[in-house]
Image (cartoon, rainbow, N blue to C red):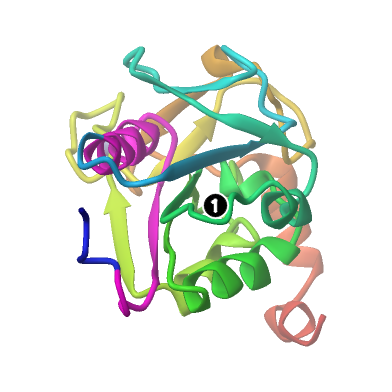
Amino acid sequence: MNTWRLNSTGWIEVICGSMFSGKSEELIRRLRRAQIARQRVQIFKPRIDDRYSDDHIVSHSELRIESQSVSSSQDILESLGDRTEVVGSDEAQFFDDGIVAVCEKLANMGKRVIVAGLDKDYRGVPFDPIPELLAIAEYITKTLAICVRCGNPAANCTQRLVKSGKRILVGHGNAYEARCRRCYEPPEEAAEEEAAQPRAAVASG
Ligand SMILES: [Zn+2]
């Protein structure tokens, strides 16, 4: 019998980084370790992400693990089994802001919560609700990609290669590449937006 969980508290782990940095791979690796140890694991992803498979989290390297698609963060609580010990989620940046309270609640219930997501959008702007999750997490892992342009092993920017003002372009894997901060080129519309909106205004909004 697994007695380690008895009386133990929960916690939150966040895995974040740019696209192609191996977030899903790392998430799958941790969840798989828990499954091998016969811990009860439940894995979710927001329904918006239907890139490869509706009932699996799939990494770019083709690793996969079974998951349940949910429409909102609240659905995670409603789908939660009584004996679940570990709760995982990928693409956390696509959840509503309620995901922060849900993760907190799960950890307070004694569960190990592991969430992965993009820390910045294609404009280089922190991708809500990931910053809030980072603030409440016990453990944070920043995954880094290799810059496609120059080979810098510390690439943390997601370069969009097609023109679009939309924050989310799902299912356009070829529309992005990982770049380091030197090679990253912010989209023009983002630069204009920033110029029109002084920092103080952003902070008070
Ligand atoms: Zn570079």
| 138 sits to left or right of 2 | right
Q: Report the residue at 50% width, 42% height from top.
A: 42
- Position of residue 111 measured from the top left corner of the image (x, y, whole percent): 44, 65
* Residue 37 in which image quadrant: top left
Q: Horizontal placement of 195 versus 186: left or right?
A: right
Question: Is residue 18 found inside the magenta-colored segment of the image?
Answer: yes
Q: In this view, does 60 lie above or below 5?
A: above
- Asked if one can make out residue 37 in the rendered structure from this viewpoint, the answer is yes
Q: Which residue is drawn at 57% across and 66% down?
A: 103
Q: Which residue is drawn at 33% across and 18% down?
A: 63
Residue 189 shown in magenta: no
* SS class, disc 1: loop
User: Is 92 located above or below residue 164 in the figure?
Assistant: below
Residue 164 location, x and y as percent?
76, 29
Q: Is residue 198 left or right of residue 131?
A: right
Q: Can residue 90 be seen in this view?
A: no
Task: Write down the region rendered in magenta.
Answer: 6-35
Front residue of 122/6: it is: 6
Is the residue marked by circle 1 packed among few (<14), some (14-19), or many (20+) residues within 10 Å? some
Q: Position of residue 106 (x, y in %)?
A: 55, 67
For the residue pair 141 and 150, the one nearer the viewer reads as: 141
Q: Nearer the viewer, residue 188 or 74?
A: 74
Residue at 35 percent of width and 49 percent of height: 181
Of residue 119 and residue 181, the one placed in the foreground of this image is 119
Q: Mark 1: is the Cβ under 8 angstroms from ligand 1?
A: no
**Residue 70's image quarter?**
top right
Three-letter amino acid code at disc 1?
Gly
Quarter occupied by residue 99:
bottom right
Residue 15 vertical placement versus 105 (above, below): above
Which residue is tagged 1?
Answer: 124
Ligand 1 resides in the quarter of the picture at top left
